[in-house]
Amino acid sequence: MSATDLPATAVAPPVRRSSRRRSVNLLVGAILFGTILVIALVSLVWTPFPLEDTTGGRLSPPSLQNWAGTDRLGRDLFSQLMVGARLAMLVGFGSVLIAALLGITLGLVAATAGRWVDDALSSLLDIAIAFPTLLLAMLIVAWRGASLESATLAIGLAGSAVIARLTRVTATRVLAQDFITASRTSGTGSLRILFHHVLPNVWPTLVVPLALQFGGAVVAEASLSYLGLGSPPPNASWGRMLQEAQSTVLVAPTAAILPGILLVATIIGMNLLADGLRDIADPTTRSIR
């Protein structure tokens, strides 16, 4: 018996399980990422203690006064974690915005320009993709100086090459479709075709890569801060917290464990959320219900 001869009830359960799994991924991702985002927003108006406050006692364990304990200087860890979430969100969204604007622009130019421009941009994108992202970010930060803005710009520029390449490939396929030819024949301008036909068919493909860019930006910012090239003190970064806690990890493990947990939760939450949103935005990935 072939697969087409099976009754409808025989194939329905896998579809339901797939739909249920996608819903769970979207829900879990929204909860994880939403929690970190709420913490970041709350830190804009309130933290338990100022970051400069060193009156909590050195390496104190979690208590009612210091919910996550204190570090080796007596600073409240929970306050640092909240500010670290704010910095992670700023770097993540900022670098994704830079990568999206620059990458989509270059990708559309390469897809619509002549052969020579396309070949030149494609070669430059190949070189940029092959260059290590963290190394490029370190070079830009070292040139501009260690700051949150430098880290965001460096990470966004490093990630724009991948977005540009995906945009070029997807836009080229869309421009080859019959409805694009019909639009041109009817006298529709090139800009209208790009904004009304190409971009709506391109952006669902970029949802997951941009989410990966967000997670990669959070990791890159933590790596730069760990190396002393991130946002300078008194700003608290999860990467700097990990670097400062490594010498006292056996005495006060929460100082190293909690930033790592928040870092992993942010990346996993964003990836699961993006995967669920892709299924909603891209009709070709939806299961037949």
Image (cartoon, helix red, strand yellow):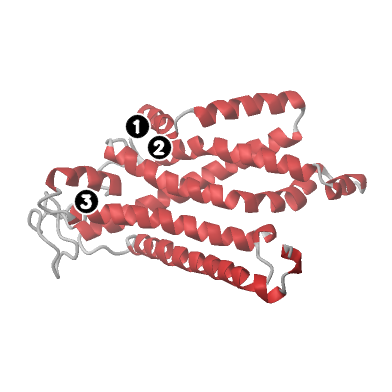
For residue 194, side relative to residue 49 (left or right)? right
For residue 108, side relative to residue 17 (left or right)? right
Q: Amino acid at mark 1?
A: Gly
Q: Considering depth in this image, is 86 or 249 the residue closer to the camera?
A: 249
Residue 150, disc = 2
In which quadrant of the rendered view does residue 265 lie?
A: bottom left
Residue 81, how many percent across, how many down? 27, 56
Residue 55, how many percent across, how many down? 9, 57
Q: For mark 1, what is the residue?
A: 145
Q: Earlier in the sequence, mark 2 or mark 1?
A: 1
Would you say residue 83 is visible in this rendering? no
Q: Amino acid at mark 3?
A: Ala
Is label 2 in a helix, a strand or a loop? helix
Contact, mark 2 vs mark 3 (Cβ under 8 Å): no
Q: For mark 3, what is the residue?
A: 256
Q: Nearer the viewer, mark 2 or mark 3?
A: 3
Q: Earlier in the sequence, mark 2 or mark 3?
A: 2
Q: Considering depth in this image, is 270 or 149 the residue closer to the camera?
A: 270
Q: Is residue 158 above or below residue 76?
A: above
Q: Considering depth in this image, is 279 or 90 the residue closer to the camera?
A: 279
In the rendered image, the quadrant that contains the N terminus is bottom right
Q: Considering depth in this image, is 99 or 202 the residue closer to the camera?
A: 202
Would you say residue 48 is visible in this rendering? yes
Question: For the point 64% across and 36% down, which residue is it?
Answer: 106
Dot 3 crowding, Cα within 10 Å, few <14, some 14–19, many 20+: many
Query: How far is disc 2 from disc 3 in space, using C-alphas?
Result: 26 Å
Contact, mark 2 vs mark 1 (Cβ under 8 Å): yes
